[in-house]
Amino acid sequence: MLKRIIGPLLFLVFAWFVVSNEDARTIIAGIAIFLVGMHYMENGFKLFSGGALETVLARFTSTTPKAIGTGFLATAVVQSSSLVSVIIISFLSAELIGLTQAVGVVFGSNIGTTATAWLVSSFGLKIKIAHYALPMLIFGVVLQFSRHNSYKGLGSVLIGLGFIFLGIAYMKDGFETMKQGLDLAEYAMAGYAGVFVYVLFGAIATVVIQSSSATMAIIITALATGQIDYINALSLAVGANIGTTVTAVLGALASNKNGKRLAVAHFIFNMVTGLFAIVFIYQLKALVDFLSPLLAIASNDDAMRLALFHTIFNVTGVLLVVPFIKRLVNYLETLFREEEEGRGRAKYLTSEVMEIPATALAALRKETIHLYDKSLEAIVHAMNLHRTEIYSEAGIDEVVEQSRSPIKIDIDRVYQEELKSLYAEILEYASMSHSHMSQEDNNQIYDLKLSARRIIEMVKDVRELQRNLNYYAKSNNIFIIEKYNRLRAELITVLRMIQQIREYEGDEEDILTRIEVQRASLKETEVALNHEVDTLIRERKIESHSASSLINDIGFTHSISKKLLKCAVTLWVRDEDIKGLGDEYGYE
């Protein structure tokens, strides 16, 4: 009951404060407009980049220096470390990049957030920024009516910039007006006592606002209008960096294990950086004073000097932590292991992954392969075979001869407890991804859903096959036993070829050729087996009811084999043009 009262009560107190205090209302309105601008910027770059940002983050993170540089540039351009974090968590979940690369991008992203401070101090305070904000908003809204996502994205970016500039203008006006009635600089505290107090204020402000960029904008505008002392502004900037750790932790609570590991890395980095900056704040201030003239920053331009300080201590933090990145990653990989996927749970699919088209497609492909591998285990066991024997160097006849003993497996239980839920998750997440996809990507998603359905159908087919296989294995009729062994040999042949396809790194067109040859061979085998069964019936070597079961099982085996080949085309032929050639052979 108390919890229900506290929330509305605090909101009413806040509303009264906003309504009754004109200066505070202007500043808070500026903060709100600034945050709206950040939101538009983030969503705008998602549309405007058309996947280019994801491509850059995927391709240019092969080494730690590249990952840091890419994280810095991406965040500096899009002005959103949260967007970069979402993409990196998506890539990590889809196993498109490793944890070391992801941590490097996060470190670089921290440096990239300093671009906001430079933007505010360079433009926001030195020109009539509101004059530029209004045209940006006008053109941004006009572009929103475009049918092209790129133009819509550009429109959102312009609206975002317009709101950011407008928010800065409101904050600046509010602080300048407040200066006339209340001078916060009078309460500035000297020494480390003041440092610790203002670091705490900066951290709390960032936790409340949930944006270190917005906090930095507030600090810079307050400093430029003389509301706070320079050294206390430096402390507030350090606190803002520390406050982002709380934001990252809160955001990671609903994330998967990869998101949580990155949040821990972010926390460690910001705490190390923050502690270093607190201890050496006066030395860093002296370094800023030394570098400012070299960078043509005026001695009285405290806003620009604050931006320089913000950059220096973030870069220093990266230099301090990077030498230990391997140890950090080893530690991170020991965390949250209890969240490893269950036997019937998706391994790659999360809501974060589905937000990015490139990772959504990659994750759905890998999850379908995951379903294939789990289903294949059930299929081969139902045929009294082991995958280690199938993929061994032994001859096919030798494998069949050595695998006579029935393997106890309940296909219905495996389907209900392990495969059905995984298949459902693939369909659910595939449906979630459609709104973000191009038509070409949606076609690939459809093919993956079709493959997942075929995989489940194979499991149901082998359930019927298993019953007769185990029944006739006890028979004394060598003819019917030989035919069932032929069926098992056919399955081994197909599975061995598919395994070779999975490991093949040559021309993908060769894959289609090999599959077409195998498909034609399957058809010939099916026809030959049916003729042989007819002959056995005429010669009374097998009974008619046994023959009917065998004919049905020939059909089931051939159906499984064809579906395996169709799945192989979808899952392991990546070139869409080459895959299109498969239509001529009836693969799709």
Image: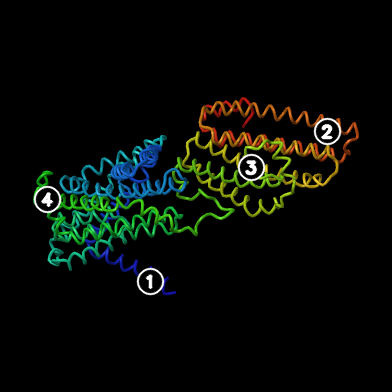
Name the side, left or right, on which 378 lies relative to 201.
Answer: right
Nearer to us of marks 2 and 4 is 2
Q: Residue at x 65, y 35 (%)?
A: 494
Residue type at mark 4 is Asp
Quarter of the rendering containing residue 221: bottom left
Q: Is residue 521 visible?
A: yes
Q: Assess disc 2: are there few (<14), some (14-19) or many (≥20) residues with their C-alpha within 10 Å of its C-alpha.
A: many
Residue 458 sits in quarter: top right
Q: Which residue is mark 2?
A: 533
| Residue 455, disc | 3
Compared across the picture, whether 137 is left or right of 98 comes to left
**Mark 4 and mark 3: span between their CA atoms?**
66 Å
- Residue 506 appears left or right of 483: left
Q: What residue did someone put label 1 on?
A: 6
In space, the residues marked 2 and 3 are separated at their CA atoms by 28 Å
How far apart, in angstroms, are the residues tagged by discs 1 and 2? 80 Å
Mark 2 near mark 3, Cβ–Cβ under 8 Å? Answer: no
Q: Nearer the viewer, residue 181 or 335?
A: 335
Indicate which disc, 2 or 4, sits on the residue closer to the N terminus: 4
| Mark nearer the N terminus (2 vs 3) | 3
Q: Amino acid at mark 2?
A: Val
User: The C terminus appears in which quarter of the rendering?
Assistant: top right
Q: Earlier in the sequence, mark 1 or mark 2?
A: 1
What is the three-letter code of the residue carrying label 3? Ile
Residue picked out by circle 4: 301
Answer with mark 3 or mark 1, whichever residue precedes in sequence: 1
